[in-house]
Image: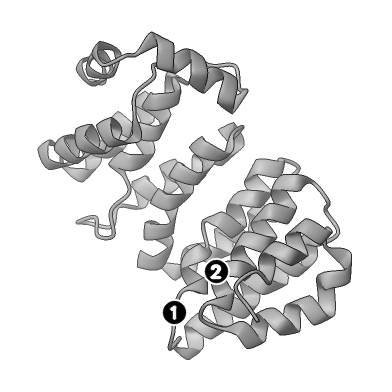
Amino acid sequence: MHEPYLATLHALADPERATGMRAYHKTDRVYLGLTNTQLNELTKEWRGELDVPDRVALADALWRTDIFEARLAAAKLLTQARLRPDDQAAWQLIASWCPDFDSWAIADHACMAGQKRLVADPTRLDEVERWTTSDHMWTRRAALVITLPWTKQNNPKPAELEARDRILGWAADYVTDHQWFIQKAVAWWLRDLSKHDPDRVHDFINQHGDQMKPFARKEALRLLK
């Protein structure tokens, strides 16, 4: 069923822009040169046309092409706060993509879709916790990116605070992993949390900051005085 949708992406291809994107992202795959605005408009239209099972099926098919814009479109098809029903298949598909992550752009789009499904059913954090011990760096990173909603509550309920502390525990386990993308993810989580819960960020830095790379520690504290 994905052929007409893939043909639409190809019809909008911009070869010159695609060349620049390939150089920027430094990952060997097909790039079509579409803009994020174009993808947003297309996937909004497709979401309106398709029910949830068909969206999941289309997202799966587009992801399997390994075309950059098709993978972004796959994620955008499932980036919605409410899916009626909150189809377990959508979450399972997003989670199944983790081993394929090999670039921040694709991983972050997929994680944005996953954030909605986690908020809809926080028990899925149990599965995400297993990602934290993966041999695959991008999967470990995804555990923090996909849980960013837990940095944003101003008045968290007890269960949300418990989840926040749980995820901070994962971040604490990451501080000795000095791969750039892991350090950046820890800093990102802490920086976003600092807007809403500065005390926890200060406590984290006091306990673990000396094990972080200097750039990550600085980024984590950037919004704090």
Which residue corresponds to mark 2? 192
Q: Which quadrant, please, contains the C terminus?
A: bottom right
Q: Pinpoint residue 70: horizontal percent, then vertical percent.
A: 37, 25
Local crowd at mark 1 within 10 Å, few (<14), some, or many (≥20)?
some
Seen as rendered, the residue at the extreme left is: 49
At 22% from the left and 56% from the top, the residue drawn is 85
Which residue corresponds to mark 1? 153
Q: Pinpoint residue 122: horizontal percent, then vertical percent.
A: 45, 69
The amino acid at mark 2 is Asp
At 79% from the left and 46% from the top, the residue drawn is 179
Residue 57 picture quarter: top left
Element type at marker 1? loop
Give the number of the mark in front: 2 or 1: 2
Left or right: residue 88 versus residue 206 is left
> Quick one: label 2 or label 1, which is nearer the N terminus?
1
The residue closer to the viewer here, 92 or 203, is 203
Q: Does residue 94 sit above or below 71 in this rendering?
A: below
